[in-house]
Image (cartoon, rainbow, N blue to C red):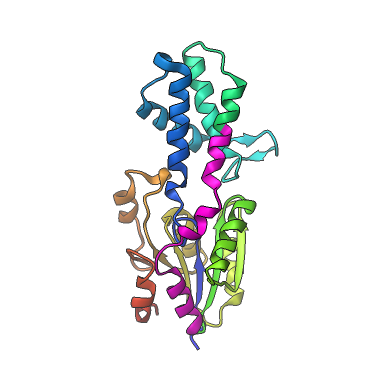
């Protein structure tokens, strides 16, 4: 029995998530152009504006809760409505409440739970089953909206992908990773994720080793070479896909 601890990220590590937002963004841009006509900016500017506004709103306060939006379900749909408001203000047009409501509804399409099981990354079940067979402790630590993430966990369960423990948090800190170490039977702890800053760095601070599987998500577009150059190669392996965990298991010492 190995007894290693593997803490897996969820979004874009086990389930593809990056393109869930693509169609709603395109649909929102189309609606804005349809509504504003020649007063609408070019669609590329609308898409860039969406990314700018959505990135900013992560740390803004949600008036419904009094807390930061972070990765809550309200943020992205609201960002699409904010894009329209911003464009209207620039064009000196009064925004329509009906259009804003439509944009919010379009944004909710990003959370279509029927997509989750289809988006499970190839090799995920094989790798998780393999680690369980080795006697390793396999847990899931994900940040995001608890309701949304719970549906993704159900999708994994329906695919018979099981974890010893599942935690959903607002942000990943070294504390969360330290808490997980109580489950390990050996001092070999690994954090597996697609975001070096979020999934790996706080784990390294907690005494883990990292398995970084890069994915170019919306918040790191064009920055991947820079990110990989910062990876602590002594403490973190960089894999191309999840299957490498099984294929290179003997290297994990």
Magenta span dominant secondary structure = helix
> Does any portion of residue 76 appear in the rendered image?
no
Residue at x 42% of width, y 66% of height: 210
Residue 3 x, y percent position in the rendering:
52, 83
Residue 204 vs 184, above or below: the answer is: above
Tell which of 2 and 148 is nearer to you.
148
Classify residue 61 by image quadrant: top right
| Residue 13 magenta-highlighted | no
In the displayed structure, would residue 200 be above or below residue 29? below
Q: Residue at x 47, y 15 (%)?
A: 90
Residue 250 shown left or right of residue 78 in the figure: left
Position of 100 compared to 128: left or right? Answer: right
Q: How many marks?
A: 0
Residue 163 image point, x, y percent: 57, 72
Q: Any magenta on residue 111?
A: yes
Instruction: In the rendered view, tell whether residue 80 sits above or below residue 128.
Output: above
Q: Tell me the residue at 57%/51% (across/down).
A: 144
* Frontmost residue, 108 versus 193: 108
x then y, percent, for residue 63: 68, 33
Residue 144 visible, this angle: yes
Q: Which stretch is magenta?
A: 104-133
Residue 193 position by quadrant: bottom left
- Residue 176 falls in image quadrant: bottom right
Residue pictured at 43% horizontal, 22% vertical:
33
Task: Tell whether 116 sits left or right of 210.
Answer: right
């Amino acid at each position: 029995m190995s007894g290693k601890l593997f803490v897996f990220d969820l979004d874009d590590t086990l389930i593809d998530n990056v393109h869930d937002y693509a169609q709603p963004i395109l649909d929102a841009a189309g609606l804005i152009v349809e509504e504003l006509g020649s007063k609408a900016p070019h669609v590329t500017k609308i898409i860039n504006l969406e990314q700018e506004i959505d990135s900013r709103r992560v740390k803004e306060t949600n008036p419904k809760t009094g807390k930061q939006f972070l990765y809550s379900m309200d943020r992205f749909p609201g960002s699409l409505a904010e894009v329209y408001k911003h464009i209207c203000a620039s064009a000196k047009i009064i925004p329509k409440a009906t259009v804003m409501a439509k944009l919010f509804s379009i944004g909710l399409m990003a959370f279509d739970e029927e997509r989750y099981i289809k988006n499970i990354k190839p090799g995920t079940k094989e790798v998780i089953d393999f680690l369980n067979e080795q006697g390793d402790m396999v847990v899931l630590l994900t940040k995001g909206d608890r309701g949304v993430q719970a549906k993704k966990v159900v999708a994994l369960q329906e695919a018979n992908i099981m974890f010893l423990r599942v935690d959903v948090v607002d942000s990943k800190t070294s504390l969360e990773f330290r808490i997980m170490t109580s489950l390990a039977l050996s001092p070999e702890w690994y954090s597996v994720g697609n975001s070096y800053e979020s999934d790996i760095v706080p784990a390294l601070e907690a005494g883990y080793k990292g398995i970084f599987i890069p994915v170019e998500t919306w918040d790191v577009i064009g920055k991947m070479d820079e990110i990989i150059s910062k990876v602590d190669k002594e403490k973190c392996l960089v894999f191309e896909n999840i299957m490498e965990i099984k294929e290179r298991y003997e290297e994990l010492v």
